[in-house]
Image (spheres, helix red, strand yellow):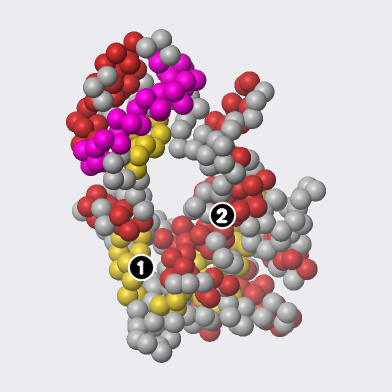
């Protein structure tokens, strides 16, 4: 049996000074496990993502609410505070003294100038875990440099290995720098919180998007250090495996991943060319990777003769990992995604109901639910101050 009322982080208080993605996503991960997350917003418009489309209304001319904002801010409460108003900042400092974790993604120095930096708050609350999410960290030559997802994808090297070999660098279509930093920040903040419970001493978590992107680039970086050559763009192909890429069937693209000799043999049988298995260019995984252009030139005309569904059925039958190249319309209609149970209906403050992907990892004995709807701007200001400062 799963218990939807059980919340692993119930009782943990989180104050989020978050804009757009990194800090809001980090806070969302904590909120989905039951932490009491309060989002601090500017009274003049709030988090900038509140204005990002799609803007949804229950009826024509009705109040509109951002679907993008809703995706990152369910299970939170919202308060408003003018950070240029000394009295309101002083009131926020009181709140900070009653929380477990503070999250912020301002440029380094901004929170310090406001009197809301780590050192100032630690003096009031030694057990506080204070997590700063920035592009380049709190120190170093790039510390004050502005950052967005695309610039960090570029500087980190990720764009240099994304795209076709003979084409320009391409950013990933999903904002991986933003979301990766949010994941690292949530994981590290919880580790620091556990340490603070044991020792009574909190800490400052310095989560840089650049560092996080390098952290998930371990294979590419080890390749560079191992042979002194920077990895290059290969489209959907792989530097050490082949055939391990996308191909065009008669009607649509699909992918296969024949990552070992046995699977390669199955590919040869599937395309009716068993002699390929003994071709001296392709007899080992390393040789197939080295000669993958020649290999793709042989396989592609075969794949173009049949529909993708036929090839996927054939490769599934043979145990070769394969998949269609879906768009989001296709994957959100997929029966396997439906069985996962991760898509739930959520209500917006304006009464609109919309499907959303909730916390995507299953845990035995616990039923993840969308929980509280995303908040209207400043909806909980007086409620939070009354509860947290009582």
Q: Is 291 part of what is drawn in magenta?
A: yes
- Compare marks 1 and 2 and give the one earlier in the sequence: 2
Which tag is nearer the camera, tag 1 or tag 2?
2
Query: x, y (%) of residue 153?
Result: 61, 48
Q: Is residue 199 left or right of residue 259?
A: right
**From which residue to which does the magenta span run?**
282-310
- Element assignment for label 1: loop
Please say whether residue 218 is visible from this viewpoint. Answer: no
Residue at which label 2 appears: 178
27 vs 388, nearest the viewer: 27
Instruction: Name the residue at 21% across, 32% down.
Output: 314
Q: Quadrant of residue 231?
A: top right
Q: Seen from this angle, which residue lies furthest bottom?
A: 61
Query: x, y (%) of residue 10?
Result: 42, 62
Instruction: Name the residue at 45% across, 37% down.
Output: 236
For residue 371, which numbered disc appears in the image?
Answer: 1
Query: x, y (%) of residue 286?
Result: 46, 17
Q: Main secondary structure of the magenta part?
A: helix
Q: Is 120 part of what is drawn in magenta?
A: no
Q: CA distance from mark 1 to mark 2?
A: 24 Å
Please say whether residue 175 is visible from this viewpoint. Answer: yes
195 vs 260, nearest the viewer: 260
Q: Are marks 1 and 2 in contact (CB under 8 Å)?
A: no
Instruction: Name the residue at 64% across, 50% down.
Output: 152
Dot 1 alpha-carbon crowd within 10 angstroms: few under 14, some 14 to 19, many 20 or more: some
178 vs 132, nearest the viewer: 178
**Would you place residue 238 above or below residue 63 in this image?**
above
**Would you place residue 226 above or below residue 106 in this image?**
above
- Element assignment for label 2: helix
Instruction: Name the residue at 53% across, 54% down.
Output: 175
Q: Quadrant of residue 323?
A: top left
């Amino acid at each position: 049996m799963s218990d939807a009322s059980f919340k692993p982080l119930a009782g943990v208080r989180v104050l989020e000074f978050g804009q757009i993605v990194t800090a809001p996503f980090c806070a969302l991960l904590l909120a989905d496990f039951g932490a009491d997350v309060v989002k601090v917003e500017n009274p003049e418009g709030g988090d900038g993502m509140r204005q990002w489309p799609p803007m949804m209304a229950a009826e024509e001319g009705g109040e509109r609410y951002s679907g993008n904002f809703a995706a990152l801010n369910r299970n939170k409460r919202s308060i408003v505070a003018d950070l240029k108003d000394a009295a309101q900042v002083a009131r926020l400092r009181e709140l900070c003294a009653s929380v477990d974790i503070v999250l912020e993604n301002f440029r380094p120095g901004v929170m310090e100038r406001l009197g809301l930096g780590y050192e100032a708050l630690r003096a009031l609350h030694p057990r506080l875990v204070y997590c700063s999410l920035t592009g380049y960290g709190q120190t170093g030559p790039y510390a004050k440099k502005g950052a967005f997802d695309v610039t960090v994808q570029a500087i980190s090297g990720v764009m240099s290995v994304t795209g076709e070999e003979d084409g320009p660098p391409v950013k990933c279509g999903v904002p991986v720098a933003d979301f990766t930093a949010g994941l690292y920040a949530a994981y590290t903040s919880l580790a620091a919180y556990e340490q603070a419970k044991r020792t009574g001493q909190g800490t400052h978590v310095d989560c840089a998007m650049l560092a996080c992107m390098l952290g998930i680039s371990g294979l590419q970086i080890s390749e560079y250090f191992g042979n002194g050559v920077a990895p290059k763009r290969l489209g959907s192909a792989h530097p050490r495996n082949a055939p391990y890429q996308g191909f065009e069937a008669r009607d649509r693209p699909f992918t296969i991943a024949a990552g070992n000799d046995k699977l390669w043999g199955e590919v040869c049988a599937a395309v009716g060319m068993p002699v390929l298995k003994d071709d001296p260019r392709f007899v080992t995984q390393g040789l197939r990777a080295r000669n993958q252009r020649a290999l793709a030139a042989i396989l592609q005309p075969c794949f173009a003769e049949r529909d993708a569904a036929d090839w996927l059925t054939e490769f599934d039958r043979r145990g070769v990992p394969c998949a269609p190249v879906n768009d989001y319309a296709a994957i959100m209609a997929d029966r396997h995604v439906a069985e996962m149970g991760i898509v739930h209906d959520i209500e917006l403050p304006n009464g609109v109901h919309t499907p959303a992907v909730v916390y995507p990892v299953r845990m035995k004995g616990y039923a993840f639910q969308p929980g509280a709807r995303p908040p209207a701007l400043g909806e909980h200001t007086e409620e939070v101050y009354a509860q947290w400062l009582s």
